[in-house]
Structures are given as structure tokens and as C-alpha cells.
Image (tube, rainbow, N blue to C red):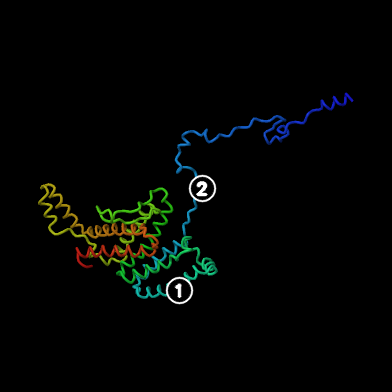
Amino acid sequence: MTVESHESSSSPSPRPAAARLPASDGVANGSPLRQRKRPSSSSRPSSDLARPASRARSPQQTVDWEIPRKTLHSSIGFLTLYLYASNGNPRNVVIALSLALAVIVPCDILRLRSSRFESLFERCVGFLMRESEKKHTNGVIWYIVGVIFVLSVYPLDIATVSILILSWADTAASTVGRLLGRYTPPLPRSIPLLPFVPFARLPLAPRKSLAGFIAGSLTGAAIAIGFWGCFAPTRDAQLYFHLPAGLAAAAQEALPAQLAEVVKRGVDLVQATDLPIGRWVGLGMLGTVCGLISGTAEALDLGSLDDNLTLPIISGGCIWGFFKLLEFFTGPA
């Protein structure tokens, strides 16, 4: 009895729980391994702590390029040029667009009121809509209203250019803004309309970028120069730049003799080449003005007003005002 009690008392005691863990849990050959300490947040280098949050890695956001929508948006410009070149009657275009509007508006009202019709509508043409439009008025309605307005109010060539700006400059500004906007600063909230007049300012959309503004301006300038310079040179009389009479003679009298001789030879050389320098200067001035108009009109923040409505109306009105100003100084076209 004594031996048995001794043997039972001397039997090996069970191993601690840590020793029975598998090797994958930090035990090798029956002995626990030393666990590697994980660096805590306080052990980071000071350079990492001082790194700005803007440089922290974040998952790259997917850019919605709106390819079907932009394709339809841009194709309207080519159709407009075709109708202008084929001497299409703008009255017939206005009637056709008005009939289309008479169908689209009731459908849009029904879409906003009936979930069943909304599902059917978005299944058919939802790929042409933005997410922000699915609970609000469809942008196509404002597009058609803007086109009808410019064709009914403005001269035909100015109305055509304003539609081209809506079709192409807006597309260029949106696409380049999505592509390169993160590399350029956002636009300011407002810019002065008149110098030294603090209360006369144009509100801009800070969500839009400088890259988009430059793209819209360059596209608007190219549209104006290409249309009035090559496609439909109907306003050359207004765009041709002439030196005021007597300016060269007055400059020669005011300048020293040697410099006046250089100016005289330069004027004679330009006149002898028969190059349309005056027309180039006029087209360059027109492109600069129209580019700034289209870029600014595209970047305006007018609250809940859709840019499909405001862009052709504002750009066409400003371009018409520019030609009226030229007409005041140079005479009618």
C-alpha cells in the first residue's frame, strides 16, 4: 500500500496548458517559442507621425467616365454642324425639339411619382443618367430647353456656337477635370466681375478644378476660331483688325528717327506680303474672349440651375454682346 501510494504520488503531473499547445501556436519540440513583439503606434518614427494625412494611402476611387452619356452629349455638336451646313431651318428644329419635350416631360414626372415606371425607365435609359438625376429632373430636359432658347433668341451662327460649346466644351471640361483635376487646385468660390467693385463677383463651383476650366476654355476658343475662321466666315468684316488711320504716322513722329524708320519699314513689309494679319489678330482676340466666356460659364455655380440650361444661354448671350460691342466700333457685319 505504501509503495502504491508512493508510485501514484511520484507519477508525472500533467503538463501546463501552454506546453500542450501545438507547434503552430508558438511551441517547438515541447518548449514555447519567444513571441515577436509587434511595434506599437508609439514606436513609429517621428517622420511617419509627422506625415500629412493627405499623403496617407487610401483606396483609389473609381472614376465614372460616363462614356455613353458623353458620347450622346458630344454627338449633338456634329448634328448641329450638319444642320447648319445644310441650311437647315432652325424653326423646324425648334418644333421637333418641342414635340420631344412634350413627351419627355410627362415621362419624367411619371418616373418621379411611380416606382414601377421608374424601374422600367431606368432599365431602358438609366445608363445615360447620373446618380444625382435619378431623384431629380432629368438633365435631358434642361438640355433641350437651352437649345430651344438659343435657337429662338440668338442669331443662327451664335446659337450654333453656343450649342457647340454646350456639346464639346462641357464634355472636355468634365473629362479633363476627372482625369487631371486631382493634380490641380480647385477653383475659387468667386471671381470679381468688375475690378475694384467688391460686391460684383461671379460665383464659381469649388468642386470644379483648374484643369477642367482650362480644358473648357481652350475648347471654347477652338470652337469659335474654327467656326468663324474656317467653317462659316460670316463675320470677317467685324473680326478684321485695322490700324487706326494716322496711327503709323503719329508713331513715326513721336519716335526717334532711327526707330521711326524701323517701324515704317516693318509696316511696308507687312503690307507688301498681303498676309491677312488683321484677320489673324481678330480671330485671336475672338478666340481669347470666347474661351474665357465658355470656361467661366461652365464653372459657374448658380445653385440648383442645371448647367445644360445655363451654359448655352450665358455663353451665347456674352458672345452676342461681344459682337454688338465690335459692331459699335467697327460697324455692322
Placement of the C terminus among the 4 image quadrants = bottom left
User: Which picture quadrant has residue 270?
Assistant: bottom left
Q: Nearer the viewer, residue 50 or 11?
A: 11
- Above or below — where is 116 with respect to 132? below
Mark 2 vs 1: CB contact within 8 A: no
- The reply, left or right, for residue 133 in relation to residue 191 is right
- The reply, left or right, for residue 244 in relation to residue 320 is left
| Residue 88 in the image, given as x and y percentages of width and height | 35, 73
Q: In the rendered structure, find residue 103 and report the number of the disc placed on it.
A: 1
- The reply, left or right, for residue 67 in relation to residue 1 is left
Q: In the rendered structure, find residue 59 and report the number of the disc placed on it.
A: 2
Which structural element holds mark 2?
loop
Residue at 41% x, 48% y: name it. 183
Q: Residues within 10 Å of mark 2 (few under 14, many from 20)?
A: few
Placement of the N terminus among the 4 image quadrants = top right
Q: Nearer the viewer, residue 151 or 288?
A: 151
Q: In the rendered structure, find residue 286 and report the number of the disc placed on it.
A: none
Q: CA distance from mark 2 to mark 1?
A: 43 Å
User: Which picture quadrant has residue 22?
Assistant: top right
| Residue 174 in the image, given as x and y percentages of width and height | 41, 57
Question: How many numbered callouts?
Answer: 2
Instruction: Tell me the kind of residue under disc 2.
Output: Pro
Residue at 85% x, 26% y: name it. 7
